[in-house]
Amino acid sequence: MTYNILTGGRGREQALLEVLHYVQPDVAVFQEVRNPQLMEDWARSLGMRAMIAGGRSLFRVALLSRLPVVSWQSHRPFPPMLNPFLEAEVECPSGKRLRVYGVHLVPWYSVLMELWRRWEIRAVLQRARAYLQDLCLLLGDFNTIGPSDTTSVRAMPLPLQLMILAQGGRIYRFAIPEVLSAGFVDCFRELHPDDAGHTLPTSSPNARLDFIFASPPLRPLLRACTVVRQPTRVREASDHFPVVAEFDL
C-alpha cells in the first residue's frame, strides 16, 4: 500500500487509521509524515512495525510492516533528493524476501521540476536496479503523470493551470519512463489498461500521482491493484486515495 497522508495527517488521524484498518495492508509506505510517534501508534494498533526515513526534511517517508523486517535503510543523496527515500527488506510467509523502496518525489508540473524528478528517480534506481531480478517493489507519491495517463488540466488548481499554460499547455513526463525503461512494471496499468486510476484529489480526482511498480519476477504473482475508495472516510482522510497491490507470495 502507498498513501500520502497530507501534511502529517494532523486532525485526520482517526479517519486515516480507519482506512488502514479497512485495508489491513501487510506493508504500507506513507508520504508527508511529520510525526514519528503517529507512525508508532498506528503500528501498535495494527500489529505492525514502523520505520521512518531520516533526515531533516519537513515531510518524511515511513514504512509500516506486518511482515518481519530483515533490514532497512534511509537514503538521502542530496542533490538530488529533496525527501529521503526508504529501503527495506521484509520476509514473506513463504520465506521469500521482498525488497521495498518507498519514495516521495518533488511536486509541481513545470518542466524544471519534472527534470528534477527524473534526476531523483535515477538516484533511487541506482540502488533498486540491483534487485530487478529479485522480488522488488518501488512505490510512493511520484508527483508526476505517467506517459499514457490522462488528466484534466481544467480541474486543477489555478496555479497549476497557469504553470502548464506557460509551457505551451504541455505536461512533461520524463520520470515514469525512467522506471519503465529500467524494467519495472506499473501494477495498476498492467491490470487496468483503460482505467484512468486517478488518485488526487479525493474531492474530484483528475490525476494519477501514486504508483506501485514491481520487478519482473513479481509480475506473474500480481493478483490485484486498486485505488482504495472505501471506507467513506477515505475522502476526508487525505487529498490522496491510497493504492494497494496484492501478490501471491
Image: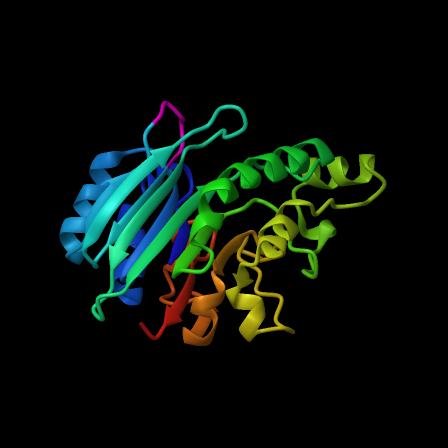
Q: Which residues are magenta?
A: 55-60
Which residue is more in the foreground, 117 or 130? Answer: 130
Between 62 and 181, the one lying in front of the other is 181
Apparent side of residue 217 relative to residue 42 in the rendered image (left or right): right
Q: Residue at x 27, y 42 (%)?
A: 72
Q: How did the renderer colour the structure? A: rainbow
Note whether residue 201 is visible: no
Occupied quadrant, residue 204: bottom right
The reply to whether residue 81 is in sight is: yes
Residue that appears at 30% across and 57% down: 27
Where the C terminus falls, by quadrant? bottom left
Q: Position of residue 46 (x, y in %)?
A: 18, 57
Residue 48 drawn above or below residue 82: below
Give the left or right position of residue 11, taking residue 163 as reference: left
Q: Position of residue 227 (x, y in %)?
A: 47, 65
Residue drawn where x is 70% and y is 61% of the image: 148
Height in image: 156 above or below 241? above
Residue 231 picture location, percent across and down = 35, 66
Image mark count: 0
- Magenta stretch, main secondary structure, is loop
User: As displayed, is residue 35 above or below residue 177?
Assistant: above
Q: Nearer the viewer, residue 153 or 67?
A: 67
Quarter that holds the N terminus: bottom left
Please tell me which residue is depicted at 53% across the width and 59% down the height of the picture. Answer: 184
| Up/down of 105 relative to 151, above or below | above
**Which percent across, then down, holds residue 140?**
46, 49
The answer to whether residue 149 is left or right of residue 52 is right
Would residue 142 be counted in the magenta stretch?
no
